[in-house]
Amino acid sequence: MSKHGLIPPHGGNLVNLVVDAARGALLKQTANDLPKVALGEREQCDLELLAVGGLSPLTGFVGEQEFHSVCDTMHLTSGVPWTIPIVCPVDRGTAGRISVSQPVALTDDRGQVLAVMTVTEKYTHDKRKEAEKVFGTKEAAHPGVAVTMTQGDICLAGTLEVLTPRHDPQFADWRLTPAQTRAAFAEHGWETVVAFQTRNPIHRAHEYITKCALEVCNGLLIHPLVGQTQKGDIPADVRMKCYEALLASYYNPKNTLLSVLPAAMRYAGPREAIHHAIMRKNYGCTHFIVGRDHAGVGTYYGTYDAQKIFDEFEPGEIGIAPLKFEHTFWCKKSGAMASDKTTNSTKEERVFLSGTAVRDMLAKGQRPPVEFTRPEIADILIESMRGG
Protein backbone atom coordinates (compact mmCIF):
# COMPACT_ATOMS: atom_id res chain seq x y z
CA MET A 1 0.00 0.00 0.00
CA SER A 2 1.17 3.57 -0.62
CA LYS A 3 1.55 6.18 2.08
CA HIS A 4 -1.94 7.41 1.20
CA GLY A 5 -3.45 3.98 1.83
CA LEU A 6 -4.08 3.19 -1.86
CA ILE A 7 -2.43 0.32 -3.68
CA PRO A 8 0.32 1.48 -6.10
CA PRO A 9 -0.45 1.16 -9.83
CA HIS A 10 1.02 -1.80 -11.69
CA GLY A 11 4.69 -1.05 -12.29
CA GLY A 12 4.63 1.81 -9.78
CA ASN A 13 3.32 4.81 -11.75
CA LEU A 14 -0.08 5.69 -13.19
CA VAL A 15 0.37 6.55 -16.87
CA ASN A 16 -1.40 9.55 -18.43
CA LEU A 17 -0.97 10.02 -22.19
CA VAL A 18 -3.59 12.75 -22.70
CA VAL A 19 -1.93 16.00 -23.80
CA ASP A 20 -2.89 19.43 -22.47
CA ALA A 21 -5.21 21.76 -24.37
CA ALA A 22 -2.45 23.75 -26.09
CA ARG A 23 -0.61 20.68 -27.34
CA GLY A 24 -3.91 19.11 -28.33
CA ALA A 25 -4.89 22.11 -30.45
CA LEU A 26 -1.52 21.99 -32.23
CA LEU A 27 -1.76 18.27 -32.88
CA LYS A 28 -5.29 18.64 -34.19
CA GLN A 29 -4.07 21.20 -36.75
CA THR A 30 -1.22 19.03 -37.97
CA ALA A 31 -3.12 15.72 -37.87
CA ASN A 32 -4.98 16.48 -41.12
CA ASP A 33 -1.71 16.27 -43.04
CA LEU A 34 -0.56 13.02 -41.44
CA PRO A 35 -1.11 9.47 -42.68
CA LYS A 36 -4.24 8.04 -41.09
CA VAL A 37 -4.50 4.72 -39.28
CA ALA A 38 -8.08 3.69 -38.55
CA LEU A 39 -8.19 1.64 -35.35
CA GLY A 40 -10.47 -1.34 -34.99
CA GLU A 41 -12.89 -1.53 -32.08
CA ARG A 42 -10.49 -3.58 -29.94
CA GLU A 43 -7.64 -1.12 -30.54
CA GLN A 44 -9.87 1.89 -29.79
CA CYS A 45 -10.64 0.33 -26.42
CA ASP A 46 -6.96 -0.37 -25.82
CA LEU A 47 -5.98 3.18 -26.76
CA GLU A 48 -8.47 4.64 -24.30
CA LEU A 49 -7.11 2.47 -21.50
CA LEU A 50 -3.52 3.29 -22.45
CA ALA A 51 -4.38 6.99 -22.41
CA VAL A 52 -5.88 7.07 -18.92
CA GLY A 53 -3.50 4.63 -17.26
CA GLY A 54 -5.74 1.57 -17.15
CA LEU A 55 -2.93 -0.39 -18.81
CA SER A 56 -0.08 1.02 -16.72
CA PRO A 57 2.88 0.59 -16.97
CA LEU A 58 2.40 0.47 -20.77
CA THR A 59 2.96 3.84 -22.42
CA GLY A 60 1.94 2.68 -25.88
CA PHE A 61 1.22 -0.31 -28.09
CA VAL A 62 3.92 -2.91 -27.52
CA GLY A 63 6.94 -3.41 -29.77
CA GLU A 64 8.18 -6.73 -31.13
CA GLN A 65 10.40 -7.66 -28.18
CA GLU A 66 7.60 -6.99 -25.70
CA PHE A 67 5.10 -8.86 -27.88
CA HIS A 68 7.13 -12.06 -27.77
CA SER A 69 8.04 -11.64 -24.10
CA VAL A 70 4.36 -11.35 -23.14
CA CYS A 71 3.32 -14.29 -25.31
CA ASP A 72 6.16 -16.55 -24.14
CA THR A 73 6.68 -15.58 -20.48
CA MET A 74 3.57 -13.66 -19.35
CA HIS A 75 5.92 -10.84 -18.36
CA LEU A 76 7.19 -7.64 -19.94
CA THR A 77 10.91 -7.50 -20.67
CA SER A 78 11.26 -5.48 -17.46
CA GLY A 79 10.01 -8.50 -15.51
CA VAL A 80 6.61 -6.97 -14.69
CA PRO A 81 3.76 -9.51 -15.09
CA TRP A 82 1.71 -9.00 -18.24
CA THR A 83 -0.38 -11.61 -20.03
CA ILE A 84 -1.93 -10.09 -23.18
CA PRO A 85 0.03 -8.16 -25.85
CA ILE A 86 -1.55 -4.78 -26.60
CA VAL A 87 -0.86 -4.23 -30.30
CA CYS A 88 -1.66 -1.81 -33.11
CA PRO A 89 -2.01 -3.97 -36.25
CA VAL A 90 -2.37 -2.52 -39.76
CA ASP A 91 -2.55 -4.09 -43.20
CA ARG A 92 0.58 -4.35 -45.33
CA GLY A 93 -0.55 -1.58 -47.66
CA THR A 94 -0.94 0.90 -44.81
CA ALA A 95 2.34 -0.22 -43.25
CA GLY A 96 4.14 0.25 -46.56
CA ARG A 97 3.15 3.94 -46.61
CA ILE A 98 4.50 4.57 -43.11
CA SER A 99 8.14 5.06 -42.25
CA VAL A 100 9.83 4.56 -38.90
CA SER A 101 10.16 7.95 -37.10
CA GLN A 102 7.07 9.23 -38.96
CA PRO A 103 4.07 10.59 -37.03
CA VAL A 104 0.66 9.12 -37.93
CA ALA A 105 -2.87 10.04 -36.86
CA LEU A 106 -4.82 7.29 -35.13
CA THR A 107 -8.55 7.62 -35.81
CA ASP A 108 -11.79 6.00 -34.72
CA ASP A 109 -14.18 4.31 -37.17
CA ARG A 110 -15.69 7.70 -38.04
CA GLY A 111 -12.32 9.13 -39.07
CA GLN A 112 -12.01 11.39 -36.02
CA VAL A 113 -8.48 11.76 -34.69
CA LEU A 114 -7.84 10.21 -31.29
CA ALA A 115 -4.08 10.39 -31.04
CA VAL A 116 -0.80 10.98 -32.85
CA MET A 117 1.77 8.21 -32.76
CA THR A 118 5.38 8.75 -33.76
CA VAL A 119 6.28 5.34 -35.15
CA THR A 120 9.45 3.79 -33.75
CA GLU A 121 8.91 0.22 -34.90
CA LYS A 122 7.15 -1.93 -37.49
CA TYR A 123 7.11 -5.70 -37.12
CA THR A 124 5.29 -8.81 -38.30
CA HIS A 125 2.18 -9.62 -36.32
CA ASP A 126 2.60 -13.27 -35.36
CA LYS A 127 -1.12 -13.93 -35.11
CA ARG A 128 -0.80 -17.70 -34.88
CA LYS A 129 1.56 -17.38 -31.93
CA GLU A 130 -0.75 -14.88 -30.23
CA ALA A 131 -3.70 -17.21 -30.71
CA GLU A 132 -1.88 -20.25 -29.39
CA LYS A 133 -0.20 -18.55 -26.41
CA VAL A 134 -2.90 -16.07 -25.32
CA PHE A 135 -6.08 -17.94 -26.21
CA GLY A 136 -4.74 -21.48 -26.00
CA THR A 137 -6.28 -22.33 -29.38
CA LYS A 138 -5.98 -21.45 -33.05
CA GLU A 139 -9.60 -22.31 -33.80
CA ALA A 140 -11.38 -19.53 -35.66
CA ALA A 141 -14.59 -20.41 -33.80
CA HIS A 142 -13.09 -18.79 -30.69
CA PRO A 143 -14.34 -15.16 -30.74
CA GLY A 144 -11.03 -13.71 -29.53
CA VAL A 145 -9.04 -15.69 -32.08
CA ALA A 146 -11.50 -14.66 -34.80
CA VAL A 147 -10.83 -10.97 -34.11
CA THR A 148 -7.07 -11.51 -33.94
CA MET A 149 -6.94 -13.40 -37.24
CA THR A 150 -8.77 -10.62 -39.10
CA GLN A 151 -6.31 -7.98 -37.87
CA GLY A 152 -3.49 -6.58 -39.95
CA ASP A 153 -0.25 -8.46 -40.60
CA ILE A 154 2.04 -5.63 -39.43
CA CYS A 155 2.13 -4.03 -35.98
CA LEU A 156 3.11 -0.44 -35.28
CA ALA A 157 4.65 0.80 -32.04
CA GLY A 158 5.76 4.26 -31.00
CA THR A 159 5.30 7.30 -28.81
CA LEU A 160 1.66 8.23 -28.19
CA GLU A 161 0.14 11.66 -27.68
CA VAL A 162 -3.58 11.33 -27.08
CA LEU A 163 -5.93 14.19 -27.96
CA THR A 164 -8.99 12.48 -26.50
CA PRO A 165 -9.40 8.92 -25.23
CA ARG A 166 -12.77 8.67 -26.99
CA HIS A 167 -15.16 10.94 -28.91
CA ASP A 168 -18.71 11.01 -27.49
CA PRO A 169 -18.20 8.04 -25.17
CA GLN A 170 -21.11 5.91 -24.02
CA PHE A 171 -21.90 6.11 -20.29
CA ALA A 172 -19.81 9.25 -19.87
CA ASP A 173 -21.07 9.81 -16.31
CA TRP A 174 -19.94 6.32 -15.31
CA ARG A 175 -16.66 6.35 -17.25
CA LEU A 176 -14.32 7.08 -14.37
CA THR A 177 -10.59 7.01 -15.05
CA PRO A 178 -8.18 5.23 -12.71
CA ALA A 179 -7.25 8.61 -11.21
CA GLN A 180 -10.94 9.31 -10.55
CA THR A 181 -11.73 5.95 -8.95
CA ARG A 182 -8.62 6.28 -6.80
CA ALA A 183 -9.80 9.72 -5.68
CA ALA A 184 -13.26 8.31 -4.90
CA PHE A 185 -11.78 5.47 -2.84
CA ALA A 186 -9.63 7.93 -0.90
CA GLU A 187 -12.63 10.19 -0.30
CA HIS A 188 -14.61 7.24 1.06
CA GLY A 189 -11.66 6.20 3.20
CA TRP A 190 -11.56 2.74 1.60
CA GLU A 191 -8.14 1.17 2.06
CA THR A 192 -9.29 -2.19 0.72
CA VAL A 193 -11.50 -2.32 -2.37
CA VAL A 194 -12.70 -5.41 -4.22
CA ALA A 195 -13.49 -5.23 -7.94
CA PHE A 196 -16.14 -7.27 -9.71
CA GLN A 197 -15.67 -7.80 -13.45
CA THR A 198 -18.84 -8.54 -15.39
CA ARG A 199 -20.20 -8.55 -18.91
CA ASN A 200 -23.61 -9.87 -17.85
CA PRO A 201 -26.48 -8.65 -15.67
CA ILE A 202 -25.86 -9.48 -12.02
CA HIS A 203 -27.98 -12.42 -10.87
CA ARG A 204 -28.35 -13.77 -7.35
CA ALA A 205 -25.12 -15.81 -7.43
CA HIS A 206 -23.15 -12.72 -8.48
CA GLU A 207 -24.88 -10.66 -5.83
CA TYR A 208 -23.96 -13.25 -3.22
CA ILE A 209 -20.24 -13.40 -4.06
CA THR A 210 -19.89 -9.61 -4.31
CA LYS A 211 -21.46 -9.21 -0.89
CA CYS A 212 -19.28 -11.97 0.58
CA ALA A 213 -16.28 -10.11 -0.81
CA LEU A 214 -17.55 -6.84 0.62
CA GLU A 215 -17.61 -8.40 4.07
CA VAL A 216 -13.80 -8.57 3.97
CA CYS A 217 -13.15 -5.27 2.15
CA ASN A 218 -14.09 -1.65 2.84
CA GLY A 219 -15.54 -1.02 -0.60
CA LEU A 220 -16.88 -2.74 -3.71
CA LEU A 221 -16.29 -1.53 -7.27
CA ILE A 222 -18.89 -2.92 -9.68
CA HIS A 223 -16.89 -2.54 -12.88
CA PRO A 224 -18.75 -3.87 -15.93
CA LEU A 225 -16.92 -4.16 -19.22
CA VAL A 226 -18.59 -1.99 -21.87
CA GLY A 227 -16.13 -2.28 -24.76
CA GLN A 228 -16.18 -4.78 -27.60
CA THR A 229 -18.07 -8.00 -26.86
CA GLN A 230 -19.36 -10.82 -29.05
CA LYS A 231 -22.72 -11.19 -30.74
CA GLY A 232 -25.23 -12.66 -28.32
CA ASP A 233 -23.94 -10.85 -25.24
CA ILE A 234 -26.55 -8.61 -23.61
CA PRO A 235 -26.05 -4.99 -24.82
CA ALA A 236 -24.21 -2.69 -22.44
CA ASP A 237 -27.05 -0.17 -22.17
CA VAL A 238 -29.44 -2.91 -20.99
CA ARG A 239 -26.87 -4.20 -18.53
CA MET A 240 -26.32 -0.72 -17.12
CA LYS A 241 -30.05 -0.40 -16.37
CA CYS A 242 -29.81 -3.69 -14.49
CA TYR A 243 -26.79 -2.58 -12.47
CA GLU A 244 -28.39 0.72 -11.51
CA ALA A 245 -31.65 -0.97 -10.45
CA LEU A 246 -29.83 -3.60 -8.41
CA LEU A 247 -27.53 -1.14 -6.65
CA ALA A 248 -30.44 1.19 -5.86
CA SER A 249 -32.34 -1.53 -4.01
CA TYR A 250 -29.94 -4.16 -2.72
CA TYR A 251 -26.52 -2.61 -1.99
CA ASN A 252 -25.34 -0.01 0.52
CA PRO A 253 -24.27 3.06 -1.48
CA LYS A 254 -21.79 3.99 1.26
CA ASN A 255 -19.72 0.95 0.40
CA THR A 256 -20.38 0.49 -3.32
CA LEU A 257 -19.27 2.33 -6.46
CA LEU A 258 -20.42 1.70 -10.04
CA SER A 259 -18.10 2.61 -12.90
CA VAL A 260 -17.51 1.17 -16.37
CA LEU A 261 -14.40 -0.38 -17.90
CA PRO A 262 -14.00 0.59 -21.58
CA ALA A 263 -12.10 -2.59 -22.41
CA ALA A 264 -12.53 -5.03 -25.28
CA MET A 265 -13.53 -8.52 -24.21
CA ARG A 266 -11.05 -11.07 -25.55
CA TYR A 267 -12.51 -14.25 -24.02
CA ALA A 268 -8.97 -15.40 -23.23
CA GLY A 269 -9.89 -17.23 -20.04
CA PRO A 270 -6.97 -17.57 -17.59
CA ARG A 271 -4.71 -14.98 -19.19
CA GLU A 272 -7.54 -12.49 -19.34
CA ALA A 273 -8.29 -13.06 -15.67
CA ILE A 274 -4.79 -11.79 -14.86
CA HIS A 275 -5.27 -8.93 -17.34
CA HIS A 276 -8.55 -7.94 -15.71
CA ALA A 277 -6.97 -8.07 -12.26
CA ILE A 278 -4.03 -5.86 -13.29
CA MET A 279 -6.36 -3.26 -14.78
CA ARG A 280 -8.39 -3.15 -11.54
CA LYS A 281 -5.15 -2.74 -9.60
CA ASN A 282 -4.52 0.36 -11.72
CA TYR A 283 -8.00 1.59 -10.85
CA GLY A 284 -7.01 1.35 -7.17
CA CYS A 285 -8.49 -2.00 -6.14
CA THR A 286 -6.70 -4.27 -3.69
CA HIS A 287 -8.80 -7.39 -4.31
CA PHE A 288 -10.36 -8.98 -7.38
CA ILE A 289 -13.18 -11.52 -7.62
CA VAL A 290 -12.40 -14.56 -9.78
CA GLY A 291 -15.34 -16.88 -10.17
CA ARG A 292 -16.19 -19.89 -12.27
CA ASP A 293 -14.99 -19.78 -15.91
CA HIS A 294 -13.80 -16.17 -15.67
CA ALA A 295 -13.48 -14.60 -19.16
CA GLY A 296 -14.15 -17.98 -20.69
CA VAL A 297 -16.15 -18.99 -23.72
CA GLY A 298 -17.47 -22.37 -24.85
CA THR A 299 -15.39 -25.28 -23.58
CA TYR A 300 -11.96 -23.83 -24.30
CA TYR A 301 -10.93 -23.54 -20.64
CA GLY A 302 -11.35 -25.58 -17.49
CA THR A 303 -13.96 -24.40 -15.01
CA TYR A 304 -11.41 -22.98 -12.56
CA ASP A 305 -8.36 -22.46 -14.83
CA ALA A 306 -8.71 -18.69 -14.38
CA GLN A 307 -8.18 -19.17 -10.65
CA LYS A 308 -5.28 -21.60 -10.98
CA ILE A 309 -3.23 -19.26 -13.20
CA PHE A 310 -2.71 -16.86 -10.28
CA ASP A 311 -0.65 -19.60 -8.62
CA GLU A 312 1.81 -19.54 -11.55
CA PHE A 313 3.13 -16.18 -10.34
CA GLU A 314 5.32 -15.51 -7.34
CA PRO A 315 3.46 -14.46 -4.16
CA GLY A 316 2.73 -10.73 -4.35
CA GLU A 317 3.97 -10.50 -7.94
CA ILE A 318 0.61 -9.51 -9.40
CA GLY A 319 0.03 -7.15 -6.46
CA ILE A 320 -3.74 -7.51 -6.25
CA ALA A 321 -5.27 -10.34 -4.23
CA PRO A 322 -7.63 -12.72 -6.04
CA LEU A 323 -10.76 -13.76 -4.15
CA LYS A 324 -11.61 -17.16 -5.60
CA PHE A 325 -15.24 -18.27 -5.52
CA GLU A 326 -16.79 -21.58 -6.49
CA HIS A 327 -20.07 -21.91 -8.38
CA THR A 328 -22.89 -20.67 -6.14
CA PHE A 329 -26.64 -21.28 -6.28
CA TRP A 330 -29.83 -21.09 -4.25
CA CYS A 331 -30.01 -24.11 -1.99
CA LYS A 332 -33.59 -25.14 -1.14
CA LYS A 333 -32.38 -27.30 1.71
CA SER A 334 -30.46 -24.43 3.35
CA GLY A 335 -32.92 -21.73 2.32
CA ALA A 336 -29.97 -19.56 1.25
CA MET A 337 -27.26 -19.05 -1.33
CA ALA A 338 -24.61 -21.74 -1.08
CA SER A 339 -21.80 -23.60 -2.84
CA ASP A 340 -20.38 -27.10 -2.67
CA LYS A 341 -18.23 -25.84 0.18
CA THR A 342 -21.20 -24.86 2.33
CA THR A 343 -23.99 -27.35 1.63
CA ASN A 344 -24.49 -31.09 1.22
CA SER A 345 -27.69 -30.69 -0.76
CA THR A 346 -28.49 -32.83 -3.77
CA LYS A 347 -28.70 -31.54 -7.33
CA GLU A 348 -32.50 -31.61 -7.09
CA GLU A 349 -32.38 -29.31 -4.06
CA ARG A 350 -30.59 -26.58 -5.96
CA VAL A 351 -32.06 -23.86 -8.18
CA PHE A 352 -30.15 -24.04 -11.44
CA LEU A 353 -31.16 -22.63 -14.81
CA SER A 354 -29.15 -22.80 -18.01
CA GLY A 355 -28.62 -19.65 -20.04
CA THR A 356 -30.90 -21.09 -22.73
CA ALA A 357 -33.68 -21.73 -20.22
CA VAL A 358 -33.41 -18.20 -18.83
CA ARG A 359 -33.52 -16.65 -22.29
CA ASP A 360 -36.57 -18.75 -23.21
CA MET A 361 -38.40 -17.63 -20.08
CA LEU A 362 -37.58 -13.97 -20.63
CA ALA A 363 -38.62 -14.17 -24.29
CA LYS A 364 -42.01 -15.46 -23.14
CA GLY A 365 -42.32 -12.60 -20.65
CA GLN A 366 -41.83 -14.93 -17.69
CA ARG A 367 -39.71 -13.99 -14.70
CA PRO A 368 -37.15 -16.62 -13.68
CA PRO A 369 -37.46 -17.72 -10.03
CA VAL A 370 -36.62 -15.01 -7.50
CA GLU A 371 -33.95 -17.36 -6.16
CA PHE A 372 -32.16 -16.97 -9.50
CA THR A 373 -32.60 -13.28 -10.26
CA ARG A 374 -34.22 -10.23 -8.70
CA PRO A 375 -37.63 -9.41 -10.25
CA GLU A 376 -36.53 -5.85 -11.15
CA ILE A 377 -33.70 -7.27 -13.24
CA ALA A 378 -35.97 -9.81 -14.91
CA ASP A 379 -38.41 -7.05 -15.90
CA ILE A 380 -35.64 -4.97 -17.49
CA LEU A 381 -34.46 -7.95 -19.50
CA ILE A 382 -38.00 -8.88 -20.55
CA GLU A 383 -38.61 -5.34 -21.77
CA SER A 384 -35.35 -5.32 -23.74
CA MET A 385 -36.17 -8.62 -25.42
CA ARG A 386 -39.53 -7.17 -26.45
CA GLY A 387 -37.71 -4.26 -28.05
CA GLY A 388 -38.66 -1.81 -25.30
Image: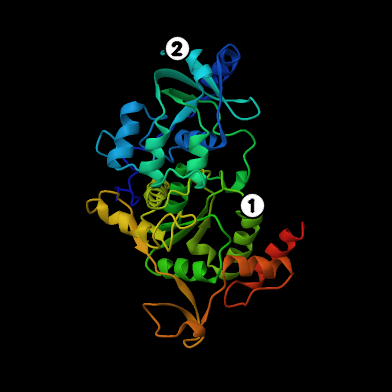
Amino acid type, label 2? Ser
Please state which of residues 263 and 173 is positioned toward the viewer in this rendering. Answer: 263
Determine which quarter of the picture holds residue 11.
top left
The residues tagged by marks 2 and 1 sit, at their Cα atoms, a distance apart of: 40 Å
Is 127 left or right of 33, judged from the image as shown?
left
* Number of numbered discs on residues: 2
Sequence order check, earlier mark of 2 and 1: 2
Q: Position of residue 363 (x, y in %)?
A: 72, 65
Q: Position of residue 268 (x, y in %)?
A: 43, 48
Work out whether 180 lies above or below 44.
below
- Residue located beneath label 2 in the image: 99
- Residue located beneath label 1 in the image: 235
Determine which quarter of the picture holds residue 244.
bottom right
Is 267 left or right of 217, judged from the image as shown?
right
Kindly state the secondary structure of the residue where label 1 is placed: loop
Q: Position of residue 48 (x, y in %)?
A: 51, 36
Please state which of residues 224 and 306 is positioned toward the viewer in this rendering. Answer: 306
Q: Is residue 108 visible?
A: yes
Work out whether 105 lies above or below 66.
above
